[in-house]
Amino acid sequence: MAASATPLPRLVERGSAGDALSLGFVTAFLSVVVCLPIAALVWASTGGAFWTAVSSAEAVAALKLTLAVAAAAALVNAVLGTITAWVLVRDEFRGKSVVDAVIDLPFALPTIVAGLVLLALYGPHSPVGVNIAFTRTAIFLALLFVTLPFVVRTVQPVLRELDTEMEDAARSLGAADRTVFRRIVLPTILPGILSGVTLAFARAVGEIGALVIISGNLPYKTEVASVFVFNRIQTGDRAGAAAVAVVLLAISFAVLLAVGGLRRLATRHERA
Amino acid sequence: MPRIRLVLALCAAAALVTAAAAGAASINVVAYSTPKTVLAKIIQAWQATPDGNGVSFTQSYGASTDQAKAVAAGLPADVVFLSTGDDVDLLVDADLVDANWNRQSYKGIAADTVVVFAVRNGNPKHIKGWNDLIRPGVQVVTPNPFSSGSAKWNVLAGYDAQRRVGKTDKQAVAYVQQLFSHVVSQDTSGRNATNTFLAGKGDVLLTYESEALASRAAGQDIQYVIPRQTMLIELPIAVLKSSSNKEAAQKFIRFTKSDTAQELFAQNGFRPVNPAILKKYASKYPTRPGIFTIDDKTIGGWRAADKRWFDPNNGLMAGIEKTVGG
Amino acid sequence: MRKVGLRVVALGYLGLVLVGPLTMVFWRTFEHGFGTFWSTLSEPNTVHAFELTLLVAAIAVPLNTVFGIVCALAIVRRRFPGKGIVNAFVDLPLALSPVVVGLSLFLLYGRGGWFYGFFTGHGVQILFALPSMVLATVFVSLPFVAREVVPTLREIGEEQEQAAHTLGASGWQTFWRVTLPSIRWAVIYGVVLTTARCLGEYGAVAVVSGRIEGKTETATLRVQDQYENFNLAGAYGISLALAAIAVCVLVAMTMLRPREGAPA
């Protein structure tokens, strides 16, 4: 860093026109695409109608259901995702690269297709005899699918970089596998798991495509927040839709803050 | 740099193409959720006539009330074919449809159908009448009355069926509340409710006769019962004031009342409004002595029904949903 | 022993949640033979749906690629106030529900919205037409190129660019000849992710498009439309086509995924 001290000022000077242009472009693009619509949303939710809309029984039920099932799916995938990452990094078997590639399927496959297929697999014409269509289990399964890659992909790089020396040393001193994992591995991969879980949670809270076909839309029973917002838009109740949408927006920002904080926590470890 | 120019050129070309396509004579039909099959056939038939030659169509299907609200919110439309006069009134109030729409031929109605109970094969729970719906253990599927026209018909039919057998207004409203305590699914549209029922939910689906017949024609395993007391569903069609192809749209609407179109309706599960053609298909569409309409004095027409039942804040259904669901 | 146990758990889980659904798409589509598959795909409204999806992607992906590169350069190389806010807004689409995206566009450009009067006055239809669908898709697929390029830019540092400057290259030449080639694999990977996101978008477009058959119905919207109209064969056919594209995307992702610590 210090080596480039002398030429730096010249670089900044020469680029000043390009500087302004690129910053202007970024600001303009972001404003048109993201900031203005979000501002319109926040604006629409201000006013007295907000609290009535957000505290309506149906809205509260939808939010509660969403948060509960999303948290459950994210946590299950935290555990299984960590195990999967471990297997992918530490284990060797034929076809491992294929398995590694398939992990990203929920990123690549359109969610509506995922929902249709889950209905085919676990609905009334299920080839395995399981019928949980239009229940909360169906929502849970759909969210499990869409959040699967997150923890795997945040833990894998950390595991890869982890030096096995300390674990081997601990084991040679007589520590059990479980202790080795708990005392040595887990603290290192924990920030990775946490950021994966938070991102997975945000994804699950906002999911709609995989749920429209399989969840059944029963108010108070199987209606999630995103479907609630969608229905309110269709019915023309924009204030009601905006109110719950703003809650979802706040959750998204909170998640981003948390992930940013976790990232800083992890890098502070490295710097120290 | 050249690459960016190419991309810009592609975008401009795309914009031009879409603009050009919009310029040719084209009619947008915004319809409720279930009449796709019959409407496609009627459109085809009209395009074969000199009036309809060269006119292209785009269609949008969805829950009737939601569709009306979408049009009010700017969804481009030339013709609306909805499932309740209530939803057309919504557009009249938004100044998008002429208030005289129901003074056209057949009161602005293109076709009729009736409320029926769709049941499982063999009718294992022996559901024949409205009182069977509130027997313990019977699970009912209906769409949501705030988005679906079909649901509105179901609610009013349930209410008025009680009134017709001598119950008081209070008892009839209590019946509707009891009915909704048996409801296990409230999809946004009639078609969604059909799919939910076909996917295995519930013992009985309250739907249109036309929808039951359409599902059967599409190969679905569906059986239905017409209760003795049932409601005549009148399906309105109207032209939008803002239509840029008004003349063609009006010709199309007139065509839907013509013999050709009425025959197509009859062959595809709908009861024609043309009495002569209805008589011809009498065996397919049995009449019921207890059939009533929206204009029955106990309901009082759509404006009254909407205010009393479907006001989102103070209507009877809002109260019932809260009591039953919360 | 424990190793095998973990492997079984992981593979069993993946099989249940991922492989099962993927095989279902193939099985259910070809259950009725190849002929039905072909006829459902060649139905005019379905063809139009695919064309529309590709058109929207063809507009959104280049826009987001240009934005992603410029934004990454600004974040990494430039100093300016509000960098944290820019970062937050760029990352927002990753954590935000597509329905909220659709609603925000609905509120901005629909009746009663800030821009409604302006656009209607000029006879331009935003909602229920292509422009809103493009805006929605650009919004949801915004972050990918930027997020892939930023770490790469940080890693490679400014030495090469400064060297070019001292040799007399202009800003534009430096960018084109030095910066861009060094980030090209990150850009390509980001483009793959962006394209996949565009092709698979459902929620935001469902809100703003009006789902007019043959006009504003994308492939993903058409899947739901076919399902609703008892045409399961049609729904699976389109799903299979989308799944096949997804598999190609997976292959591309695997081949192009940036390896940790490897030079760009």
Image: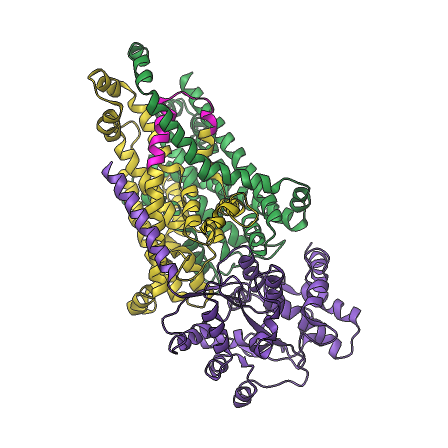
Chain colours: A green, B purple, C yellow
Tell me if residue A49 can be seen: yes
Q: Residue at x 45, y 83 (%)?
A: B260
Residue B177 percent coordinates (x, y): 72, 65
Residue C59 vertical position relative to residue A29 in the rendered view, above or below: below
* Stretch in magenta: C66-85
Q: Which of C244 and C61 is in front in this view?
A: C61
The residue at the point 45 percent across, 67 percent down is: C229
- Please tell me whether the stretch drawn in magenta is mainly helix, strand or loop: helix
Q: Is residue B188 visible?
A: no
The x, y position of residue A210, in whole percent, is 46, 52
Q: Is residue B252 above or below residue A77?
A: below
Q: Which residue is drawn at 63% across and 39% down?
A: A46
Give above or below for C232 relative to C68: below
Q: Residue most toward the left?
A: C167
Q: Where is residue B71 in the image (x, y as percent from the top left)?
A: 53, 59
Q: Is the residue B221 above or below the residue C2 in the image?
A: below
The residue positioned 29% from the left and 20% from the top of the image is C158
Viewer-proximal residue among B309 and C247: B309
In front of the other: A238 or A184:
A238
Query: Hey, which quadrant is residue C8 in on the image?
Result: top left
Q: In which quarter of the image is the C terminus of chain B?
A: bottom right
